[in-house]
Amino acid sequence: MKKVITYGTYDLLHEGHIRLLKRAKALGDWLIVGVTNDNFDRERGKLNVRNNVLERVEAVKATGLADQIVIEDYMGQKIDDILKYEVDIFAIGSDWEGKFDYLGEFCEVVYLPRTEGISSTMLRAETEKEIRIGVVGCGRIAQRFVPEATKVERAVVAGYYDTDRAAAERLAEESGVGNVYDSYEELVAAVDAIYIATPHLSHYEQSRYALEQGKHTLCETPLVLCREQAEELFALAKSKGVVLLEANKTAFCPAFTHLITLIKSGLIGDVVGVDASESKLWSEEKLRRELDPEMAGGSLYEMGSYPLLPIMKLLGTGYENINIYSRLNDNSVDVYTRGIMLYPNAVASFQLGLGVKTEGNLVISGTQGYAYVPSPWWKTDYFELRYEDQNRNKKYFYSWDEPGLRYEIREFLSCIVNGRIRSSRLTPEESIAMAGVMSQFAERKNLFEI
Ligand code: CTP
């Protein structure tokens, strides 16, 4: 029996799909159709697939052309499937010409001419518009954000505002898209969503204003430095029915998300400890803003939300107490901070340095094993699960696409497009609890100088 396999998303099943399936089936006696899973599509940047995987499977089934349907879940699965099902022919539309030649080692590869004039993207585009994003604060991080936005379907950077107009003009010119506005209010009025990349102390006012105007808001981390402000902003977003998301890039990257789901599935037993660190040993010149007391400088404000992320995701937001130990410089800015958080059945710790260097890894200790993520763990692309019996140890490899902002933009757009105002990858409660740690630090509560 000659087996043929083909893959696709098959969203809004159309004539092009059906013709492809017919011709693929005619190549052999048994047709296997791989339908991409929702998560897999999201990771590939396809955010706006209309039908979920079950609906898409049903649609393919209803054509009566597939003898077998499989779900495509991960990169590299095509080779696994070809070997597992002893496939003779891999068939795909000619829009992929050349892209799957590597499968020729395992079976015959056939590119079938694509049907002109129709695609799922086209059908979706008829009813969907772009999301126009306005950028406020045109410094280092915004310069990385703008090219990253081009990697996300439907995201369009449409405008800029900066108190230093020349910085906004430079960014607009470099990116070749979007207008420069004379005021923040004008920028907000002109777009669907706002990305806030200004210094920490502007975040609250700017987020509040954008949300009040009914605009989706992606705000750089830390969102705010005070718990009440975070609560107020999320309540405002909810009442306006818009998305407010803290741009903590690690929270949305595929490897970190997978690490969290593996651990929540019990692969290392109960989590009893989370230890995470991050430090920068840059020149004083480069750290000028980060160490400026007038701009809420210091290692906790600057980087604290990163180690707090795995702590809160795995142990929750309900810690019993937190002690903070800091080395403050002459301006009372913390250049090194260590925090210890006590939970009902677990303890977490973090170390942060600005002008102090330390190992930047993440270790999650459990009753059956531990997870180890080497430095720089916040750009997660690799981790290991380790056990007493080393034969059980497992290594997980991924890629991190520098500078990694596309993941948060993808999540932001996905929330907007799908009408989800909360992200499970970084929930409002987690952002609020992180702001709570910042509040405690600001109030110098349980703070010990070293
Ligand atoms: N296909 C085709 N002719 C079309 C559209 C799709 O032959 N007009 C083929 C693709 O080449 C692929 C299969 O149908 O082999 C499934 O493709 P899929 O990516 O699901 O469909 P598209 O309509 O191309 O979807 P999108 O626009 O979201 O990429």
Image (cartoon, grey):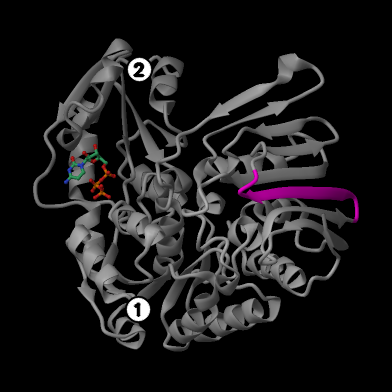
Q: Quadrant of the C terminus?
A: bottom right
Would you say residue 409 is visible in this rendering? Answer: yes
Residue type for callout 1: Thr
Q: Is residue 183 above or below residue 91?
A: below
Q: Main secondary structure of the magenta part?
A: strand
Query: Percent from the top left, x then y, of residue 7?
Result: 32, 34
- The residue under label 1 is 163
Q: Secondary structure at mark 1?
A: loop
Q: Is residue 109 above or below residue 428?
A: above
Q: Is residue 24 above or below residue 354?
A: above
Query: Percent from the top left, x then y, of residue 407?
Result: 44, 52
Q: Residue at x 76, y 32 (%)?
A: 370
Magenta stretch?
A: 344-356
Residue closest to the eye, 178 or 164: 164
Label for residue 87? 2
Residue closest to the eye, 27 or 233: 233
With 114 as the anchor, is 420 left or right in this view? right
